Amino acid sequence: MDETDGDLHAVLEAVAAGELSTAEAEARLAGYATTDVGRFDAARETRRGVPEAIIADGKAPAEVGSLAATAVETTGRAIATRVDDDDAAAVEAAVDDGVTVDRDERARTLVARAPDYEPPAVDATVGVVTGGTSDAPVAGEAAVIVRAMGATVDWVEDVGVAHLGRSLDQVERLRETDVLIVAAGREGALPTVLAGLVDAPVIGLPVSTGYGFGGEGEAALSGMLQSCTVLSVVNVDAGFVAGAQAGLIARAVGAARGE
């Protein structure tokens, strides 16, 4: 009997003994759990280092709740983005008693944790910077993902280039971080400016604030892509992606510190 057969036998015995649900068993053996709504990628964090998240846009609240319950059952935690009041209520109703549900209404995120869930810990700090207060919802989504991946978040708000002094008086603080996420709308200049002042990786996060020609984030995205200082750029309003990328960099930094 090879190792795979042994794992299968152990899982089947645990199911027979009532120690594992069928969803947990499937997640261990196949890497995903099948529900009436879809298949939840329970092995993504182990395989990729990035937690699976449920994007609520385009889903009925009951579907969001069902997937969140499966996520908690199979991984101990559920993360949902683009959440509204109905989605949050559905998750609260779907998860078991004792599950903690933390919601950030402004960032439109929700994190549910089982009582025995042990969060990861990473010895690294990610600076999350906003050009203006209007950029906070998208930057907040990024911050939630960074924290979910175990890194510390240093939140620096409202340092846009309309008054460069607001940026410059935070530079020493930003230089203490291991990676920066810089969220900006309008012309998207802030990531370029800060990337020229710090020696940490900078991830530009264009935000759909603005109006008229180039509004809805297009000008911010174009400006960041044409940056003359070195930075990486994600799509417009892609807070999850920025947070996940920063979390991966933070994990590598933390691992290097532990060597």
Image (cartoon, rainbow, N blue to C red):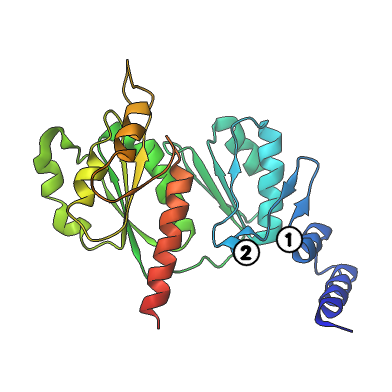
Label 1 environment density (alpha carbons within 10 Å; few <14, some 14–19, many ≥20): some
Please provide percent x and percent y for residue 259: 40, 83
Nearer to the camera, 110 or 36: 36
Residue found 53% across the figure and 36% down from its top? 82
Do the residues under discs 1 and 2 have CB atoms within 8 angstroms? yes
Q: Quadrant of residue 177?
A: bottom left
The amino acid type, in three-letter code, at marker 2 is Arg
Asked which secondary structure carries label 1, the reply is: loop
**Residue under pointer 2:** 47
Of labels 1 and 2, earlier in sequence is 1
Please provide percent x and percent y for residue 98: 63, 56
Label 2 environment density (alpha carbons within 10 Å; few <14, some 14–19, many ≥20): few
Give the left or right position of residue 162, taking residue 54 as reference: left
Residue found 15% across the figure and 54% down from its top? 171
For the image shown, how many numbered marks are present on the structure? 2
The amino acid type, in three-letter code, at marker 1 is Gly
Please provide percent x and percent y for residue 146: 43, 55
Give the left or right position of residue 120, taking residue 197 as reference: right
Residue found 73% across the figure and 60% down from its top? 31
Please determine whether, in this image, residue 17 is positioned above or below residue 184.
Answer: below
Is residue 115 visible in the rendered image? The answer is: no
Residue found 32% across the figure and 18% down from its top? 211
The image's mark for residue 31 is 1
